Amino acid sequence: MPISLNQGEALTTLLAALRKDWNPAGIRAALKKASFLGSAAEVAVAACRCAADPAMRTPFLIAEPGPHWQGTTAGTRQAPTMCAAHPAQKAGACPACFKAARPKPANFTLPPRTRPRDWTPEPVVSDLAAVRERADEMEGL
């Protein structure tokens, strides 16, 4: 069961008291993100462990995998395997590796566009004149 609003506010107050350098709005955002990782008790335990660790400089890390989740259901989840060549991307979903593995054929061309992306229709001259007349009338000219 996700953490409730009242539980989140109480936990935010506790964590803000423990870590004066953490912004309460940041704590709330991290708890909201972490609320689906485990029960309210598990989120509270992980958040308090995170706050107790001076190496954790920001509450954002509450929702990230780490030793503060040890002993909880979220702590038993496997972290995704990352791409060896591009560590910021998940293995099997790395766009750079995908492009390298499947290059475009030499004769590949995109079909011509029927109109440019920034195309806007030209105003009809008669409509433009009518609009200008109404604008002049409204200004009292």
Image: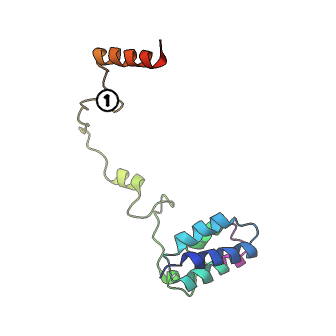
Residue at horizontal 76 percent and vertical 69 percent from the top: 20
In the displayed structure, would residue 120 be above or below residue 109? Answer: above
In the displayed structure, would residue 132 be above or below residue 37? Answer: above
Q: Amino acid at mark 1?
A: Pro
In this picture, residue 36 sits left or right of residue 49: left
In this picture, residue 37 sits left or right of residue 30: left
In this picture, residue 114 sits left or right of residue 101: left
Question: In the image, residue 29 lies at what x, y percent?
Answer: 58, 66
Mark 1 surroundings: few (<14), some (14-19) or many (≥20) residues within 10 A: few
Q: Is residue 56 magenta?
A: yes
Question: In the image, residue 47 lies at what x, y percent?
Answer: 63, 77
| Mark 1, residue position | 116
Q: Nearer the viewer, residue 2 or 77?
A: 2
Residue at horizontal 65 percent and vertical 78 percent from the top: 10
Question: In the image, residue 132 lies at what x, y percent?
Answer: 39, 16
Residue at horizontal 30 percent and vertical 14 percent from the top: 125
Kindly state the secondary structure of the residue where label 1 is placed: loop
Question: In the image, residue 83 lies at what x, y percent?
Answer: 45, 63
In the displayed structure, would residue 12 be above or below residue 23? Answer: below
Q: Can I make out residue 116 in this image?
A: yes
Which portion, as a residue range, is magenta?
49-57
Q: Is residue 68 magenta?
A: no
Q: Nearer the viewer, residue 50 or 4?
A: 4
Residue at horizontal 31 percent and vertical 21 percent from the top: 122
Q: Residue furthest top?
A: 141
